[in-house]
Amino acid sequence: MRYPPPDIPPDASTSDRPAPVEGDNIAPISPVTPRRRRRIANVDALVPMPFALVFALAAMVAFAFGGWLWWLTSGLGDPRATLTKTLTVGVPFSFALWIAWLVVSIAVVQRLGRTLVPVDRLLREAGLACWPLFLALGMAIPAVSFGVGLVAIGGWVAATQAALARVAGRTGRGVLAANLAGFALWCVVMSLLASGDHAIAPGPFVAESIWEAVTSQGIVVVAQ
């Protein structure tokens, strides 16, 4: 004959509590440890490095192709030659400068925040953060070409900012300054690639090439 366990005061020690009765089949609940929380939060860091880099490269190809579609509406230059230069020169430059962007960001974060940033994880996170560049394909719409290009770049910078903050484990002005410093390098060199007769810079930077091509040909639009 089994008797119910006696009432135990709340301040009683665990050694005074009765052992569980066999057959109750009550499974203990495993707590969610900080290590498990970090593992759940960092699932995106498990993405293979080659996939992240190929994804970033594909996004930059889409970015360049969107700018070329806008170039078609200008009626200037040889479309085939422009596409070839954009894909064979502009995209590799953009990818290399993106790597330089991340290197500058890492250096600034470590300098200002004294925080060690894992390079491999940042490459994976930043590679996936290139997804807004696919929006540049919408530059084929003439009425909103430039705006779509700016939205693509702005989204890319914001997504990279979030990726850098996750990897660094901190937010604030230091991380923002690091991201903007790297982006400034990328932006300045892309602008140089769009100047003169190059027309190889991807995305909305082609607008500078279109403007210089128009002014060099002496085309003047007179309002009536």
Image (cartoon, rainbow, N blue to C red):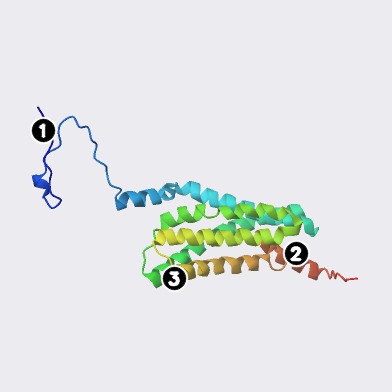
Q: Position of residue 224 (x, y in %)?
A: 91, 71
Q: Is residue 52 left or right of residue 116?
A: right
- Dots 2 and 1: beta carbons under 8 Å? no
Q: Tell me the mark number nearer the camera, choosing from 3 and 2.
A: 3
Q: Position of residue 122 (x, y in %)?
A: 44, 57
Give the residue pinned by disc 2: 210
- Dots 1 and 3: beta carbons under 8 Å? no
Q: Tell me the mark number nearer the camera, choosing from 1 and 3.
A: 1
Crowd band around label 1 with a 10 angstrom C-alpha radius: few (<14), some (14–19), many (20+):
few
Looking at numbered disc 2 in the image, what kind of residue is underneath it? Ile
Looking at numbered disc 1 in the image, what kind of residue is underneath it? Tyr
Q: Position of residue 9 (x, y in %)?
A: 13, 49
Q: Secondary structure at mark 2?
A: helix
Specify the farthest residue to the right.
Answer: 224
In primary-sequence order, the first of circles 3 and 2 is 3
Give the residue pinned by disc 1: 3
**The N terminus appears in which quarter of the rendering?**
top left
Q: Is residue 40 visible?
A: yes
Residue at image coords 15%, 51%? 10
Q: Position of residue 160 (x, y in %)?
A: 51, 60
In primary-sequence order, the first of circles 2 and 1 is 1
C-alpha separation, residue under disc 1 versus residue under disc 3: 65 Å
In primary-sequence order, the first of circles 1 and 3 is 1
Looking at numbered disc 3 in the image, what kind of residue is underneath it? Gly
Q: Is residue 200 visible?
A: no
Looking at the image, which is closer to me, 184 or 83? 184
Give the residue pinned by disc 3: 174
Residue at image coords 12%, 38%? 5
C-alpha separation, residue under disc 2 versus residue under disc 1: 91 Å
